[in-house]
Amino acid sequence: MESVTQRFYPVNPDFRNPFSRDRDRIIHSSYFRRLEYKTQVFLNHSGDYFRTRLTHSLEVSQIARTLATHLGLNAELAEAIALAHDLGHTPFGHAGGDELDKVMRKYGYSNGFEHNFQSFRVVTKLEKRYKDFDGLNLTFATLEGILKHSYPYEKPFLKENLKATFQLEFHPSLEAILVDLSDEIAYLSHDIDDGIKYGLIDFDTLRDSALVNRAIIYVEEVEKIGCKDSIFRHRFTSRLITILVYDILENNAVFHQEIPQCFKYNAAEPLPLTHTKEMEKEIKVLKKILFQSLYRHEEIAKKMFMGKRCVRKLYECFNDETSLLPKDLQKRIQNGEKTHRICADYIASMTDRYAIALYEELGF
């Protein structure tokens, strides 16, 4: 990569560092605001307490910034990547994205849909904020973190010049890997919190996880709060996050001495920023419990079935009858852009409520 702070278009310097500037551009974007009404796990209109893509992104950025600060990495870069990492997600969570990928392939578009690339597309093309160029003109370091997360990016979406720019065959920066770890910490903790709040899972089921048991025992024995207390769930969630964060800090303390404020790019092997082996095993057990008992719960399954049908029907409708698309999107097709990409951009940009309203308006 030519320079971690380089952008595709020149900018005049101001009072912010380059990654703080990225963060501000992301926060003020329309796609970031739309995350407020996009599903994380539970449909947005199901209850006021549930996390959305917006609150999830804020929680990820808070954890990532804390970890980066304590590990001597660049906190502003980690924060910017975290805030942008879900901008390309469709309505209805991963179920919506999986369905959009499936229906695009059914229509013969072999690349399908991939949310990392869609997030990259949002910040490089779809967000309209400047007269002279499309996108937000973020630094290359932030863009690479949005694309790669923790691994080389092997999907065939990018043009050859961009593949070379971001050297996609290599692993990303430590800050990007840190965001991936923070993403996992955030969703594990808040999915449990939301699931228990609405009675979709309980602590008795979760006690099969040694990780959960440790957090429960701490709250009960150290904080002296019983499981029937109204604040127990909140204290448990806080303790679970603390356990997971401490594991990363203790397992990677060497970074603070060896590579302060470092961006380490173009690594052929995975960089050693990880949980301990023991914690990785415990996380795997917890994920299995959540998959079986929460994510496949019939109440969630019913909502996701509806969401998938909504995405599928909207795509088929717009792909077959482009006159139903907004005028600016019709113009892009007339100017030579691929219909399947325009339809995917439009559906991925929708909030849950807008997609449902449009689905009903079209008579499905």
Image (tube, rainbow, N blue to C red):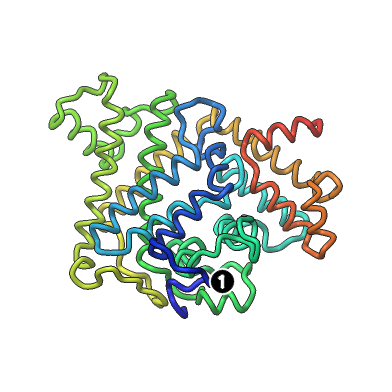
Q: Where is residue 199 in the image (x, y as percent from the top left)?
A: 42, 23
Q: Which of 80 and 154 is in front in this view?
A: 80
Going 24% across and 61% down the picture, which residue do you hit?
71
Using the image as rendered, state which of residue 324 and residue 195 is in the foreground.
324
Amino acid on which the number 1 mark rests in the picture: Tyr
Image height check: is 21 above or below 189? below
In the visual, does 85 lie left or right of 20? right
Residue 302 against residue 26 in the figure, above or below: above
Locate the C terminus and report the quarter of the image it occupies: top right
What's the residue at 18%, 69% (across, down)?
A: 257
Judging by the rendered image, the residue that carries numbered circle 1 is 9
Left or right, residue 47 beside residue 102: left
Question: x%, y% of residue 19?
Answer: 41, 62
Q: In this view, does 264 lie to the left or right of 144?
A: left
Q: Taking 245 as reference, is 216 above or below it?
A: above
Residue 111 sits in quarter: bottom right
Task: Tally the numbered discs.
Answer: 1
Dividing the picture into quadrants, the one containing residue 293 is top left
Please tell me how crowded label 1 is: few (under 14), some (14-19), or many (20+) other residues with Cα within 10 Å: few
The quarter holding residue 335 reads: bottom right
Which residue is located at x 83 percent, y 44 percent?
324
Q: Nearer the viewer, residue 115 or 5?
A: 5
Q: Nearer the viewer, residue 235 or 285?
A: 235
Q: Where is residue 225 in the image (x, y as percent from the top left)?
A: 19, 24
> Residue 190, percent across and down?
39, 37
Which element type, helix, strand or loop, lies under badge 1? Answer: loop
